[in-house]
Image (cartoon, rainbow, N blue to C red):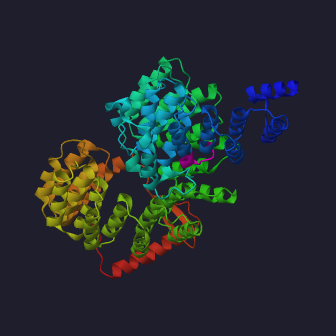
Amino acid sequence: MDSIQTTIKTLLKTPTQIKSPSQAKQIHAQVIKNHSTFTSDLLSLYSKFNLLPESLTLFNTLQSPSIHAFKPLIKCYTSNSYFFESLKCFVTMRRMGIHPDHNVFPSVLKSCTNLMCFKFGESVHGSVIRFGLEFDVFTGNALLSMYSKLQRFSALQVFDESPERTAFDQSENVLHHSYKSYPEVSQNGRNPSALSHMSDQDRRNVPMQSVRKVFETMPEKDVVSYNTLILGYVQNNMCNEAMMMIREMGDAKLKPDAFTLSNFLPVVAEYMDVWKGKEIHGYGIRHGFERNGFVINGLIDVYANCNMVEDSYQLFCSLSERDCVSWCSMIAACVKNGLFDEGLSLFRQMLSENVKPVPISCSSIIPACAHLTTLPLGQQLHGYIIRHCFDDNMFISSSLVNMYAKCGNIKLAKCVFDGMKHHDLVSWTAMIMGCASHGYANDAIFLFKQMEMEDVRPNSVAFVAVLTACSHAGMVDEGLTFFNRMVTHYDIAPDFEHYACMADLLGRAGKLEDAFDLICSMPENKTASVWLPLLAACRVHKNVDLAEKVVMQISKLDSDNVGAYVLLSNIYSSVGRYKDAAKVRHILSKKMNKKEPACSWIRIGGKVHAFIAGDESHSNYDGIVNALDILFGQIDKEGYVVDH
């Protein structure tokens, strides 16, 4: 009997020898058979295998459970996503006067994070400090994770108040309030994806000083600590700080792991730093991360942002198993670099390999349909989205609005927009721009004002949309009002797109000198494109003198700009200055040798045809030329005179 109990005790004290839940249950049976008392050790064993029902049954046999019994039960609740029950168990333990140890707090803090109970998390942090456990590396990592993920709450207060400020006799009330505040948490407390309900804007409002303070108080920092802080910086768009943490990590003689690289690669992609990307790529190969999906996906994004799609594709092909995230990364890489046909082809290939798309994969491919203006294909994709219940995704709906608008079907765009339960800035802007581009200026302005009434703050892109509407409709006064409000009311500095819209607006109204003065007032970063609308207006109003000034400005910014010289030549011809037009065309002929040929697409019979300027390789080239000759003949009969 003693030998059996000794064996049981040895096994329970070294649980690594127990490999399966069935073995754990066999040991429990032996404990009962031999009338042994190893309840706390058995609870730890069941917790190891996340056996919650067995743990509860065993725990309920205890009349006075100790910390050693509460500890595995709290961990088991958390591991099984019963976060609310985990916190209730913690409160019960504290009410019994039992002091938690360093093994309890990581599970409790994880539950706070998943339930978004920030106030209760602050209480737990106060307890951590009071029991002198703030220097424990696992507890510190859990605190870092909580503060970096619960980013819509202010975390500074916990450092400004006394550690003794929180009385745990009030914790149940705090917990109950937090629980009631989030009705999406079910009664059993399970909600593993509660964080997904937070908006992007909410996730970026955390004061990262708080997370940094937690980090700095930790006497011992491991890779997990650095990874958590780096991720927090990346999520808050604090790229420089994230790069500094990578350097600090190296100074601390800690080697980045796959999570470090996957967290940091978005920063490299944001900065389009191809050399840093190659450096990380090389590091990944040397340390065996070249097959890690997270790292590869991050590198695909880096190379795509740096216009190196072939490198992205090589990495994609190197993956032995491609999940939906890998496909999405590669599809997005193609679309981002204008390879729309290739992106659509990859999407079809993904479906043929029975990889189920997720919302992000659909949102990656919708812009390809928009740019190619392939409405039937876009409608097919919309049908797929509806069948798979992705149509309630705000980002996908916004992309569909944009796609239908660009494909010329403003009615369907409005239908999708009106069907959305909630509208964010992206969806409002897409609908406003759609109306503006199709001549519905009054509708665009009405939508913009409605957006403001619903307390959605417009950004610079939204103002481009409404200014475009004013420009196309010749609403000078309204355009000037919006432009001034953008600066004075919303404190948005105009960029070249806003100036281009205003130049086009003033130019269409014949106020060419005002448009010229407005562009000249731009503080910096002028581009040739901002002058082109004014040059087009000079052609309409046959203002040769101003056109020459504008072309001079364009040539300073972009000496190879062909479009400006074409317009100037046409302006000279329109006023009978044919010698000057010939001189410009002579200059133009030299510049045309440097110009990359343009490309156009047309969809006929379900097939997309691409044409490059001067290209005679199309199989139906002769038929196309004959059709054009017939068309030009009909145009001549209508009395059209070519503008030389």
Q: Quadrant of the C terminus?
A: bottom left
In front of the other: 202 or 111: 111
Q: Can you say whether 498 is above or below 526 in the image?
A: below
List the single residue furthest toward the bottom: 637
Residue 101, how many percent across, how many down? 55, 28
In the depicted view, which residue is nearer to us: 229 or 559? 229
User: Which quarter of the image is occupied by the N terminus?
Assistant: top right
Describe residue 465's horizontal placement relative to residue 543 as left or right: right
User: Magenta span has 84?
Assistant: yes
Rendered position, 257 above or below 578: above
In which quadrant of the rendered view does residue 442 lie?
Answer: bottom left
Look at the picture and state if 77 lies above or below 643: above
Look at 22% across and 63% down and name the residue there: 573
Residue 293 visible in this rendered orientation of the protein? no
Residue at 34% from the left image edge and 47% from the top image edge: 590
Quarter of the view holding residue 639? bottom left
| Residue range of the region highlighted in magenta in the rendering | 79-85
Is 525 one of the magenta-colored residues? no
Q: Quadrant of residue 24?
A: top right
The one nearer the camera, 155 or 623, is 155
- Residue 17 at x, y = what percent? 79, 29
30 is higher (above) or lower (below) than 434: above
